Amino acid sequence: MLRIFASLTTVLLSGALLCLPAQAAAKPWSTLTPMQQEALAPIAQQWGTLPDIQQKRLLATTKRYSKLSPDQKQRFLNRLTEWSKLTPEQRNRAREKYKAFSKVAPDKRAEVKKMVLQTEMEKLYAASGVDRIPEVSEEEQKQQ
């Protein structure tokens, strides 16, 4: 009777474990290629704590990294550094803004971008007590 109970328990537990979602192990930093490590250097310290899905997304971005110009690589690294400093709430807001902006017709994006930058500058100037709000130049728009 005990053997049957033990066998039945083993079968049930095995079946229950098979129903659980598979959780792939995170990829250790040391297994990344030198190019991947270079591209993801701003988040090297956080790498081991990132969920597997986030690691996969980040690794996907490194596929294009080797084809970037030095200026583009620096811009990528700067943006990744800034992104890594954001709180989860700030990241969610950034994602929402990106989704909303991607729905804007391509011919209207420059105009919308200028309006958003102008609004952000107004908020900054209002907080600092400055009266005059300068126009956003085309160069500043390109940098954003």
Image (tube, rainbow, N blue to C red):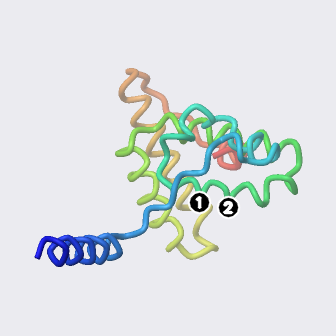
Mark 2 touches mark 1? (CB < 8 Å) = yes
Circle 1 sits in a helix, a strand or a loop, which is it? helix
Q: Decide which of 114, 100 is in the foreground and name it.
A: 100
Residue 96, label in figure: none
Circle 2 sits in a helix, a strand or a loop, which is it? helix
Residue 60, label in figure: 2
Residue pictured at 56% horizontal, 35% vertical: 134
Residue 57, label in figure: 1
Expressed as whole percent of the image width and height from the top left, the position of residue 50 reads 49, 46
Q: Amino acid at mark 1?
A: Arg
Left or right, residue 120 beside residue 31: left
Expressed as whole percent of the image width and height from the top left, the position of residue 46 reads 54, 36
Left or right, residue 116 beside residue 142: left
Q: Decide which of 139, 1 is in the foreground and name it.
A: 1
Could you classify mark 1 by the number of other residues whose Cα lies within 10 Å: few (under 14), some (14-19), or many (20 or more)?
Answer: few
Left or right, residue 71 beside residue 14: right
Q: Decide which of 97, 85 is in the foreground and name it.
A: 85
Residue pictured at 11% horizontal, 76% vertical: 1
Give the answer, above or below, for where 60 lies relative to 27: below
